[in-house]
Amino acid sequence: MIYPIESCEAGPQSGIQPGRGRSVTQQVDFLRSHQGLEEPMESIPIYETVSNCELFKGLAEKDIKKITSLCRQEALKEGNFVFQQGDFGEYLYIIFDGLVALERSIDLSTRKGTVTIDSLGKGRVLGSWSTLLGETHILMSSAICRKPAQILSIKGKELRSLMVSDKDIGFSVMENFCFLLRNRLQAAYVAMEKM
């Protein structure tokens, strides 16, 4: 269970800076080490979740097992952010259960607001794609849970390392990523047309 960062004692002595700059995974790491936060009670079937994920479809069983070793389980409440626009991104997330909306805040001088790019459910993946290229990235959208969600997080740097060391995995993941990126761009264009 992830508790809102605001519910913790914050201040310079605690090392917590509420809100910006902390991914949900970084918040969980801090809370586990300083507040005794436990892992979620119900276990996600990690192998099935990864093998059914759009980014890893078509990979061999041995390759899926390598990827599952990189996964961490997280549980989020409705209204929790997986990440926020403007945050530094290091993780990819796979949704096991729940509904997560990708949203972008916009400012067109005469109109300001938030546009929903896509709503993602079971088996869908989101996060910081440039980590697969070994580059740092500021997230261009927010991901907010519209229903309670269970997700798997994978540090992009670790997945990239696996992809570089095993070219077959690397090629398959990048091929799936190209299709995924195409679909996300189409969803973004549709969202812009509704503005």
Image: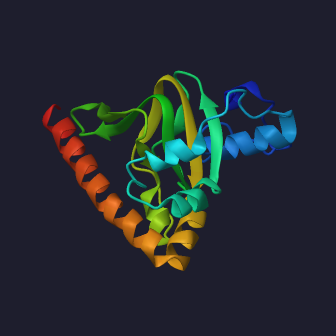
* Quadrant in the picture for residue 175: bottom left
The C terminus sits in image quarter: top left
The N terminus sits in image quarter: top right
- Vertical position of residue 158 compared to residue 92: above or below: below
Residue at image location 73% in from the left, 27% down from the top: 41
Question: 79 or 73, which lies in front?
Answer: 73
Is residue 20 at all visible to an observer of this figure?
no
- Vertical position of residue 54 compared to residue 63: above or below: above
Question: 26 or 86, which lies in front?
Answer: 26
- Vertical position of residue 94 compared to residue 5: above or below: below
Question: 190 or 110, which lies in front?
Answer: 190
Across and down, in percent, residue 95 comes to 48, 38
Q: Is residue 15 left or right of residue 27?
A: right
- Vertical position of residue 160 compared to residue 17: above or below: below
Is residue 127 at all visible to an observer of this figure?
yes
* Quadrant in the picture for residue 146: top left
Give the colouring mode of the picture. rainbow
Across and down, in percent, residue 185 comes to 24, 50
Q: Is residue 159 left or right of residue 8?
A: left
Residue at image location 13% in from the left, 37% down from the top: 193
Residue sticking out furthest to the left? 193
Q: Is residue 115 left or right of residue 192?
A: right
Residue at image location 65% in from the left, 46% down from the top: 72
Across and down, in percent, residue 188 comes to 24, 43
Across and down, in percent, residue 153 comes to 58, 47
